[in-house]
Image: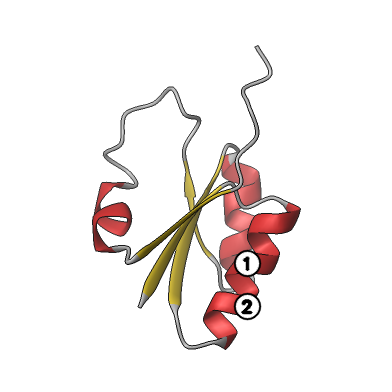
Amino acid sequence: MKTFIFGLGFSGQEIDRAARAGGFSSSGTTRSADKAQKLQASGVNALVFSGASDLSNISAALSDATHLVVCAGPDAS
């Protein structure tokens, strides 16, 4: 089973850890390239997505997901 998490903040990262510990593969989004790199260094499949950009960089992981989690907060603007 595969999870996709919109919003790898505090809650999203905990959900990711639990999912992977339970045998799921997991991918998720963050708005910052710097944060994505830090998460990737710790084994998280983090993808940059601002909500306003196109879906091309997340479409493969999203289409493979069996479970969808939304933890992303509203845009600041």
Q: Locate residue 54, reporting x and y percent.
A: 31, 29
Residue placed under numbered mark 1 in the picture: 15
Relative placement, left or right, of 55 versus 21 is left
Looking at the rendered structure, the kind of residue marked 2 is: Ala
Please tell me which residue is depicted at 32% across the width and 58% down the height of the picture: 61
Q: Secondary structure at mark 2?
A: helix
Please tell me which residue is depicted at 70% across the width and 67% down the height of the picture: 14
Of residue 14 and residue 38, the one placed in the foreground of this image is 14
Please tell me which residue is depicted at 57% across the width and 37% down the height of the picture: 31
Residue placed under numbered mark 2 in the picture: 18
Relative placement, left or right, of 74 versus 3 is right
Which residue of the protein is positioned furthest toward the right in this rendering? 10
Q: Locate residue 68, reporting x and y percent.
A: 42, 56
Looking at the rendered structure, the kind of residue marked 1 is: Ile
Q: Where's the C terminus, which quadrant? A: top right
Q: Where's the N terminus, which quadrant? A: bottom left
Q: Locate residue 45, reporting x and y percent.
A: 48, 64
2 and 1 marks in contact (CB < 8 Å) = yes
Q: Secondary structure at mark 1?
A: helix
Task: Please say if 49 is above or below 76.
Answer: below
Task: Please say if 49 is above or below 15.
Answer: above
Task: Please say if 28 is above or below 54.
Answer: below
The crowd level at tag 2 (other Cα within 10 Å; few <14, some 14-19, many 20+) is few
